[in-house]
C-alpha cells in the first residue's frame, strides 16, 4: 500500500495536532490541543455491537491482524472494536471517502483494490490489505484524500464515535510519544510526516539494562531498533582472526541512531552483536512493518551498508567470509 498526508480545517472537538507538511492546504481552526490523558466525554457513550456470523468473524480477525493503529489496544478494547465494526460491500467506482468531507468511519480492508487521490491526482493505492480514514477522525480535519474502489470488495467500518472512544487515545499517545524520536533520526527525514505517523503506530518500546545483549551476531533477524535513550556497543567476531570467538568493539551508537537494519536488507544473519551500555530504551520495528514502511529510506540505508563494508575491510582486512 501507499501512504502519506497532512491536514486542514477542523471542528470544535479537541484533537491531536496534525504535523504540518508541504501538502497542507489550510490551517486548522481548532487551536485546542488534544490531551490524550484527558477524559473524553465519548467514554460514557453506549457500546456499539454489530452481530456477525462465524464466517464474518474469521474474516474480520484476519483483516485487523496487521492494522498498526490497533497495536496499542488492550485485549478488551480490541474486542470492543471487533464488536463495533460492520461490513460494507463495495463495487468498482464507489467513492468510499471524498476529500474535504467530514469523517464518518474508519475503514479496514477485507478485500478489493482501492485508489487514493489527492486534489484529483492518484497518489497511491491499497491492494487487499491496510486501512484508511483515520486522519479526519483523529485530528478533526476534513478528509485529506478521496478513496475509490476499483474492484468489487469488502470493508470493515468503525464509526467515528467508537473510533474516538476506543482507538484514539492510545493511538494518539503513541504517535505523540514517538514524534520527537522519529523527527530526530536523520535517516527518516526523507519520509513524509504521514509516513512517520504510520511508523509510530508500528513501533514498540523495549528496555535493556547495562550489558544486556540486544542482538547476537549470527542470529536470525526479526526487526530493527531506533535508540530512544542511552547508548549501545556494537561488537564483531571475525572468522579469520587468530581467535574467532573474540569480540572486537567496532562502534558505539546513541540516541537518534538505529541498528539491526543490515540483516533485514541483506537477508543474512546478524552481522554483529549489540549490547546495552547502561540503561537503554529502543523503539523496535518488526521486519514486516520495516519492509512496508521504510521503502522510501532504502537508498540511505544501502549507502550506510556500503560504509559498513568499507569499515569491515579496513578493520579486518579482505578475506573469505
Ligand atoms: P482521512 O480521514 O483524511 C482519507 O480520509 C484517507 O486516506 C486518510 O484519512 C488516510 O487514511 C488515507 N494523503 C492523505 N490521505 C491518505 C494518503 C495520503 N494515503 C492514504 N490516505 N497520501 C499523501 C498524498 C500527498 C499518500 C500518498 C502515498
Ligand atoms: P544487523 O541486522 O546485521 C547487527 O545486526 C547490527 O549492527 C547491524 O545490523 C548494523 O545495524 C549494526 N558492520 C556491520 N554492522 C554494523 C556495523 C558495522 N556497525 C553497526 N552495525 N561496521 C561498523 C561501521 C562503523 C563495520 C564493522 C567493521
Image (cartoon, rainbow, N blue to C red):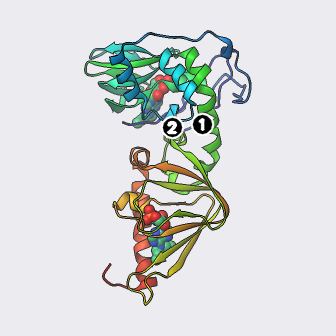
Name the secondary structure under disc 1.
Answer: loop
Left or right of 311: which side holds 26? Answer: right
Look at 48% across and 20% down and name the residue there.
Answer: 82
In the rendered image, residue 181, in percent from the top left (x then y), is placed at 62, 50
In the rendered image, residue 182, in percent from the top left (x then y), is placed at 58, 48
Q: Is mark 2 within 8 Å of ligand 1?
A: yes
Q: Nearer the viewer, residue 206 or 305?
A: 206
Name the secondary structure under disc 2.
Answer: helix
| Residue density around tag 2, few if under 14, some if 14–19, many if 20 or more, within 10 Å | some
Q: Nearer the viewer, residue 17 or 284?
A: 284
Residue identifier under label 2: 194
Q: Quadrant of the C terminus?
A: bottom left
Look at 38% across and 64% down and name the residue there.
Answer: 269
Q: Nearer the viewer, residue 103 or 121?
A: 103
Residue identifier under label 1: 19
Decide: is 254 above or below 318: above
Decide: is 104 above or below 170: above
Q: Can residue 62 be seen?
A: yes
View extreme (front): residue: 54
Decide: is 136 above or below 49: below
Look at 64% across and 47% down and name the residue there.
Answer: 180
State if disc 1 and disc 2 touch (CB < 8 Å): yes
In the rendered image, residue 85, in percent from the top left (x then y), is placed at 46, 16
In the rendered image, residue 190, in percent from the top left (x then y), is placed at 48, 50
Q: Quadrant of residue 126?
A: top left
Sequence-wise, the earlier of marks 2 and 1 is: 1
Q: Quadrant of residue 99?
A: top left
Q: Quadrant of the N terminus?
A: top left
Q: Quadrant of residue 314?
A: bottom left
Amino acid at each position: 500500500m501507499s501512504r502519506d498526508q497532512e491536514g486542514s480545517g477542523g471542528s470544535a472537538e479537541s484533537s491531536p495536532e496534525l504535523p504540518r507538511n508541504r501538502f497542507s492546504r489550510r490551517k486548522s481552526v481548532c487551536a485546542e490541543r488534544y490531551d490524550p490523558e484527558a477524559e473524553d466525554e465519548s467514554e460514557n457513550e453506549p457500546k456499539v455491537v454489530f452481530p456477525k456470523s462465524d464466517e464474518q468473524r474469521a474474516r474480520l480477525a484476519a483483516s485487523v491482524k496487521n492494522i498498526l493503529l490497533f497495536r496499542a489496544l488492550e485485549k478488551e478494547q480490541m474486542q470492543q472494536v471487533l464488536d463495533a465494526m460492520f461490513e460494507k460491500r463495495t463495487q468498482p467506482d464507489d467513492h468510499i471517502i471524498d476529500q474535504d468531507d467530514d469523517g464518518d468511519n474508519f475503514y479496514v480492508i477485507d478485500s478489493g483494490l482501492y485508489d487514493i487521490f489527492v486534489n484529483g491526482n492518484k497518489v497511491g493505492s491499497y491492494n487487499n490489505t491496510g486501512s484508511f480514514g483515520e486522519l479526519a477522525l483523529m485530528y478533526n480535519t476534513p478528509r485529506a484524500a478521496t478513496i475509490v474502489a476499483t474492484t468489487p470488495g469488502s470493508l470493515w467500518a468503525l464509526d467515528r464515535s467508537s473510533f474516538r472512544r476506543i482507538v484514539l487515545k492510545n493511538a494518539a499517545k503513541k504517535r505523540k510519544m514517538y514524534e520527537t524520536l522519529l523527527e530526530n533520526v536523520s535517516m527518516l527525514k526523507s519520509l513524509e510526516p504521514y509516513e512517520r505517523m504510520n511508523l509510530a503506530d508500528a513501533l514498540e518500546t523495549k528496555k535493556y539494562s547495562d550489558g544486556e545483549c540486544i542482538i547476537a551476531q549470527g542470529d536470525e533477524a526479526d526487526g530493527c531498533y531506533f535508540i530512544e535513550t542511552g547508548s549501545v556497543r556494537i561488537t564483531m567476531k571475525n572468522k579469520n582472526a587468530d581467535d574467532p570467538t573474540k569480540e572486537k568493539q567496532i562502534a558505539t551508537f546513541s540516541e537518534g541512531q538505529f541498528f539491526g537494519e543490515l540483516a533485514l536488507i541483506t537477508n543474512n544473519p546478524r552481522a554483529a552483536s549489540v549490547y546495552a551500555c547502561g540503561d537503554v530504551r529502543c523503539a523496535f520495528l518488526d521486519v514486516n512493518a520495516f519492509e512496508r514502511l521504510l521503502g522510501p529510506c532504502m537508498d540511505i540505508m544501502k549507502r550506510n551498508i556500503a560504509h559498513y563494508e568499507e569499515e569491515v575491510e579496513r578493520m579486518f582486512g579482505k578475506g573469505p567470509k
